Amino acid sequence: MHERCRTLTFDSVTDKINPGAAAYHYEQLAKILEGKIRSGELPAGTRLPGEMVLSQEYGVGSNTVRRALEILRDRDLVVTVRARGSFVAEQPPAAAPEGD
């Protein structure tokens, strides 16, 4: 997976965290990143930016980014390799139906 991976860079973030929404910021960030993975905007093997970059790009704290990545790992969408970073899983599982 890592030999052919590329690092994702954000030139401009189009999806924003809504501070007034009922959902926690980490849930919103996880949903944004999951959407990018499922749409193919973030293909399998792509290395995600580090916590600091994601934190700055989305205007959230590093703990928020960590919790969002934890959600994505729990959903088998992202794999984190110590000292290497987080990568989009080779074969993300099918999306759960809405409401689950």
Image (cartoon, rainbow, N blue to C red):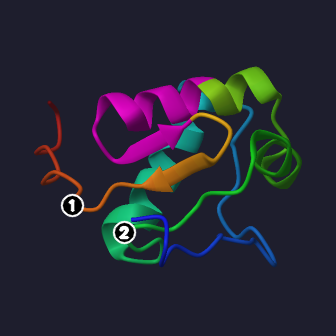
Q: Are marks 1 and 2 in contact (CB under 8 Å)?
A: yes
Badge count: 2
Image vertical order of residue 29 relative to residue 5, above or below? above
Lower sequence index among marks 1 and 2? 2
Q: Secondary structure at mark 2?
A: loop
> What amino acid type is highlighted by mark number 1?
Gln
The question of residue 77 being in magenta is answered with yes
- 25 or 6: nearer the viewer: 6
Image location of residue 17, percent across then percent down: 69, 45
Q: Which quadrant of the structure image shows residue 64?
A: top right
Image location of residue 88, percent across then percent down: 42, 57
Image vertical order of residue 68 relative to residue 77, above or below? above
- 1 or 15: nearer the viewer: 1
> What amino acid type is highlighted by mark number 2?
Ala
Q: Answer left or right for 22 relative to 51.
A: left
Q: Secondary structure at mark 1?
A: loop
Q: Mark 1, residues whose alpha carbon is within 10 Å: few (<14), some, or many (≥20)?
A: few
Image location of residue 65, percent across then percent down: 68, 33
Q: Mark 2 — residue?
A: 44
Quadrant containing the C terminus is top left
Q: Answer left or right for 47 relative to 90.
A: right
Instruction: Residue at 41%, 52% (x, y): give it.
Output: 34
Instruction: Residue at 60%, 29% (x, y): give it.
Output: 26
Image vertical order of residue 95 relative to residue 60, above or below? below
Instruction: Residue at 76%, 40% (x, y): give it.
Output: 51
**Which span is picked out in magenta?**
67-81
Number of the label disc, if any, that sits on residue 91: 1
